[in-house]
Each structure stands twice: as C-alpha cells, then as structure tokens.
Image (tube, rainbow, N blue to C red):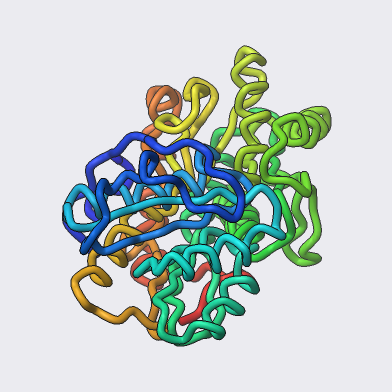
Amino acid sequence: MRSVRGMRIASAFVAGGLVLGAAACGEAPDDDNDAGGTGGKKYSACMVTDVGGIDDKSFNTSAWKGLQEAQKENGDIDIKNVQSKAEADYEVNLTGFVNQKCDFILAVGGLMEKATKKAAEANPNQQFAIVDANPGVGNVYPMQFDTAQAAFQAGYLAAGMSKSGKVGTYGGLPIPPVTIFMDGFADGVAYYNKAKSKNVQVLGWDKAAQKGSFTNDFVKQDEGKKVSDALVAQGADIIMPVAGGSGLGTTAAAKASGGKYSVVWVDVDGCESTPDCSAIVTTVVKNIPEAVKEAVLKAAGGEKLQATPGFVGTLANSGVSIAPYHDFDSKVPADLKAEVEKIKADIAAGTVTVTSKAQPTK
C-alpha cells in the first residue's frame, strides 16, 4: 500500500487480495476455505469479523489483509476467518475458535471489546488480540490507532479545498474508534480557520458537545447516502464518513454527482479499496494490516503478546497517515500540500498537540 510505506514495525508490506468468502455465523470455515492449507503443526491465526464483514473495504478488510501478509512471510501460519452477522455472534464465534484450539484469535472492531474480554478471562492461556479496543486483560493484545492525528491533517486539507466554506462528517455509531476521527477532523478545520482567518464550518459533528450525525449502522449504504445527502443539502462540499461499508453510499453518490461534492475516506486507501476513487480527495489511513501482520508473526515466533504495552499507531510511527491524493493530486494547491505535510511533522514532533476524548492510551 503506497500510503503506508515506511512503516517501522515490520518488514515491507506487500498488497494482498481478498480470498475468503463468507462463513456461517458461529462456525469457522471449512478446510477448503482455509487460506493456510493443511493445518497440522502449523500456527493457526483465526479472525472474527465485526458485522461489516470481510469485504467492508474498511477495518475488517484491513485486518484480514494483515493475516494474509503474515502467512505470505511465514508459510507455517494457517489462517481462517468467521464473519459475524450480528453482535450476538461475537462471543459464539470467539468461543468457537477457542474450541478449535486456534493459537491466535483476532477480534476486529471496538464493538467486540466486551465479548473479547469475556472470552479472554474465561480462557487465560489463550492468545487473543483486538483491533480498535483495549479490554485491559493480560492475554488480549490491543492494536489501537490515534487516528485523530491523521484526521487533523484531513480536516485542514478539506477546509483548504472547500469552495462552499462548509465540510461535513458523520459516523456509524458514537463509539471511540469512530468519534476519534471526527474530533481530529473538526480540530483540523479549526486550525485552518485560525491560521487563515477563515470560518469554514463543520457540519455533522460538534466536538465540544460530542454530538453529531450517525447512521447507526456500518453496512447499509442507503443509510450512509441519506446522512450525506442531508449534509450536502446544508452546503457541505467535502464529507468524511466514518461508517464502514455504509460510507460507500456516500462515495458512490459523490462520484455520480459530477464533482458537486467529494469525500475523505477512512481506514483503507479508498482508491485501492473502493470503485469511487474519482470522488475521493484522500483517506485517513489506519495501518491495521501492518500492525496485525507484525502481531501474528511475533506470536507465531513464540513471543507472548500482552495488553501492556500493546500497539498505538501514530503519525510518528506511521501507524496512521493520509493517503496520496490520487485523482485530486493536480487539484490540491502546492502550498496546501506543503502545509498539510508541515502539520504532520509538527504533530509527530509534538509541537502541535491533537486531543480527543477517544484517544487510545497504553
């Protein structure tokens, strides 16, 4: 992935394709669907998706790619996944992998925190890991991302690119892995306004009140389109959905709008994960694939991964970033590009501080 080049936590990242289809809830895939092959003495890494599914173009897709990359680097790793259709499936699916004696069980998404904590406490000798949460249990390795830092850059960029003077954002649910993006985005706009003596408005999120627009869903594209249509009707010409697959309703509508508005995508570079690159200015990237890959390789190598210190991705360690501008590269003024890069350096150096109630702590 071009947007995460330079990651300091593992060997070079090689993009991998998605190879595994849906599995029944509460059941791990059959061996025929097992990307690792024959099993036997291989180290088994097993992943439980959130309700968005393996092909959400977002955090589930990213985590699975990390397992695939770990397997490519170490052929003795056997990988499989099971997809959750509802929150009630989380505990069933996690327990199913415990019963199958998976060596490493990965939960994906903040919504899985309680189920993962319960399963880990019931099975203290089992190695668990989770993306976007920290249950605080010794045998659960947390991988969290300070996406407020990269979203701050994206907010500044959006403010600088907006023609209407209004930009928007919305989330799937009001949970920390979502609102952290929205906080950073709003603060980036505010930073632009202060630096340029402008008054670009943020629609869809009030950081101070921690209230805003949500789809209450991470799957339904029509819900994402409905929320972004409302923001566009209020004048927003750049929108950042933080709603998993629901956000695809916004990217598709933006692409069809003929340039009326554009999108900042999140998690995985939207020009590599969606068909709507022409409408995407940039992406606030979480380098979930590399974090997962490193965790699995370490665990397979015999290292016990623990809750402390866990992993927190930042701009300084390339755990978060903004993606290349792709189709918008010629449209972003050179001086704005330079300012966005300087913000990255300043945040990494600590001279600009980004805050959010949802920021992860080790």
340 sits left or right of 297 in the view? right
Q: Nearer the viewer, residue 141 or 175?
A: 141
Across and down, in percent, residue 200 comes to 68, 43
Number of numbered discs on residues: 0
Say which quarter of the image contains residue 262: top right
- Residue at image position (66%, 19%) is 260
- Residue at image position (47%, 41%) is 283
112 up-or-down from 325: above or below:
below
Q: Nearer the viewer, residue 124 or 53?
A: 124
- Residue at image position (70%, 49%) is 172
Task: Evaluate whether residue 352 shows in this view.
Answer: no
- Residue at image position (23%, 48%) is 13
Across and down, in percent, residue 188 comes to 57, 54
Q: Nearer the viewer, residue 225 or 204?
A: 225
Say which quarter of the image contains residue 159: top right
Task: Evaluate whether residue 66 shows in this view.
Answer: yes
157 sits left or right of 207 in the view? left
Q: Nearer the viewer, residue 74 or 184?
A: 74
Across and down, in percent, residue 191 comes to 57, 56
14 sits left or right of 55 in the view? left
In the rendered image, which quarter contains the N terminus?
top left
Across and down, in percent, residue 96 comes to 53, 63
